[in-house]
Structures are given as structure tokens and as C-alpha cells.
Image: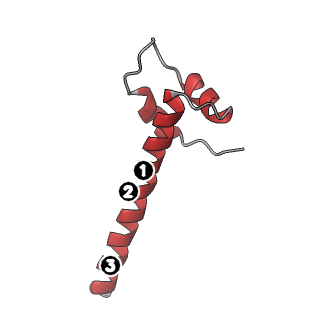
Amino acid sequence: ARKIDDEVVAKCLTLDFPGGTITRDHVIHSIEHEEYTPLRVAYDLVLDHKNAKMRIDGEVYFKYTKQNNV
């Protein structure tokens, strides 16, 4: 089973989707059942952005420690 990132789910719940109120269960269902709905697309994009930011932050930290002999 795919691990679900609760922080990303919470961020998706702050987005404005047409058609009414979106719940955590809606997002989880879309992910677990591999439904390519706007919810799932939003989840994947937010997760990708989070992972890219973590990679970039890690690279910056590595360069800083290497340059400053930390």
C-alpha cells in the first residue's frame, strides 16, 4: 500500500475545489483507489513539490557544510 503524507493531505484540504466541501476521506479514497481525479492530481503535485523542496534544501545544506568544513 502507498504511504499517505498527512501534511500533503492537509494542504490539499486548503485548496478550493468546485463542487462542495472536500474531506480528508475524499482525498484518501482518491489516493488509495488510484482515481485520477482533481484531488489526486493536486495531492501528487503538492507531494512532488514537497519532495523537490526537500531535495533542494538537502543539496544546499550539503554544499554549505562542504564549503564551511562543518
Q: Is 69 located above or below residue 32 in the figure?
A: below
Task: Check whether the beta carbons of the residues at disc 2 and disc 3 lie within 8 A of each other.
Answer: no
Estimate the spatial distance between the alpha carbons at disc 1 and disc 3, rounded to whole Å: 20 Å
Determine if residue 70 is in view.
Answer: no
Image quadrant in which the N terminus is located? top right
Q: Nearer the viewer, residue 68 or 16?
A: 16
Where in the figure is residue 24, as x and y percent of width and height?
54, 25
Q: Of the two numbered discs 2 and 3 on the same chain, state the one appearing first in sequence.
A: 2
Image quadrant in which the C terminus is located? bottom left
Determine if residue 62 is in view.
Answer: yes
Give the residue drawn at x 54%, y 33%: 40
Q: Amino acid at mark 2?
A: Lys
Estimate the spatial distance between the alpha carbons at disc 2 and disc 3, rounded to whole Å: 15 Å
Q: Amino acid at mark 3?
A: Lys
Element type at mark 2: helix
Disc 3 packing (10 Å; few <14; some 14–19; many ≥20) = few
Return the residue found at the far right.
1
Give the residue drawn at x 41%, y 21%: 17
Q: Of the two numbered discs 1 and 3 on the same chain, state the one appearing first in sequence.
A: 1
Estimate the spatial distance between the alpha carbons at disc 1 and disc 2, rounded to whole Å: 5 Å
Where in the figure is residue 36, as x and y percent of width and height?
58, 32
Where in the figure is residue 48, as x and y percent of width and height?
46, 49
Residue located beneath label 1 in the image: 50
Residue 34 is left or right of residue 44, and the answer is: right
Residue 28 is left or right of residue 23, and the answer is: right
Task: Check whether the beta carbons of the residues at disc 1 and disc 2 lie within 8 A of each other.
Answer: yes
Give the residue drawn at x 57%, y 23%: 26
Q: Amino acid at mark 1?
A: Lys
Residue located beneath label 2 in the image: 53
